[in-house]
Image (tube, rainbow, N blue to C red):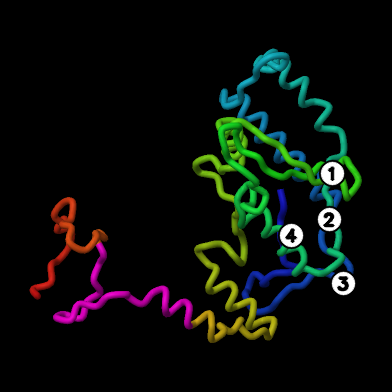
Amino acid sequence: MHCVVPGGGVSLDGERWVACRKGFFLPVRVLSRLFRRLFLEHLDAAHHDGRLQFFGEHQALSERGAFSGFLKPLRTIEWVVYAKPPFAGPQAVLEYLSRYTHRVAIANSRLIACDERGVTFKWKDYRKPTRERYQTMTLATDEFIRRFLLHVQPHGFHRIRHYGLLANQQRTHALKKARELLNCEPPSVTTDEAHTAAHEHAPTFICPACGAPMIIIEHFERGHAPRTPPSRAGPVCPA
């Protein structure tokens, strides 16, 4: 789990920006123990509600006593929370996270072939020296699809969750207020971005009679009739 947290926040009265102390971000030890407690509490609740399943050599953990004994040593050891300033600044951190949150499981550039043998792709073995890391692998098509689908989010899960300033219900107002308190100008939209946005929302075809945008229902070749009559799902132009 990765978290991006601002180095401060808006005061309770909404009149000033409260920044963290210089050279201090958050108490790592307190955060570690808080995360440990919350994680184990939710895990124990999931077991109590029967939402955990165990198989094979771990099937004995289905019993309440065995599972409680399994969690007991985890409550005393120190959990590691890795928190330190980024070497190349916050922009490098966002670029690193974006490679995991805004891409699919495997890039097209890594796919080499798809034939009767299966799917051949490139992969990286981090245990070997740099020059020998890149290798190829061929998997049966069904096995490749199975592994690919392991990276698909289950229903109800999200890759990115926003809280605080970026929470959906208050994002616009909260960011505006934070920029005012920090004396920051809102990001300006470039000419290219504005042109692209206008082009994407502009209708392609306009009805010459009423001026309303026309909806494309079907494409068919010249000299061929449509497969079925179009459905009258909406209002019809009198022209």
Q: Secondary structure at mark 1?
A: loop
Q: Main secondary structure of the magenta part?
A: loop
Q: CA distance from mark 1 to mark 4?
A: 18 Å
Q: Which residue is mark 1?
A: 126
Q: Nearer the viewer, mark 3 or mark 1?
A: 1
Q: Secondary structure at mark 2?
A: loop
Q: Does the residue at mark 2 contact the one at mark 3 (Cβ under 8 Å)? A: no
Label 2 vs 4, first from the N-terminus? 2
Q: Is residue 196 magenta?
A: yes
Label 1 vs 4, first from the N-terminus? 4
Q: CA distance from mark 3 to mark 1?
A: 37 Å
Residue 72 to residue 15: above or below: above
Q: CA distance from mark 2 to mark 4?
A: 15 Å
Label 3 vs 1, first from the N-terminus? 3
Q: Secondary structure at mark 3?
A: loop
Residue 200, percent across and down? 42, 73
Q: What residue is rendered at 24% in x and 60% in y? A: 221
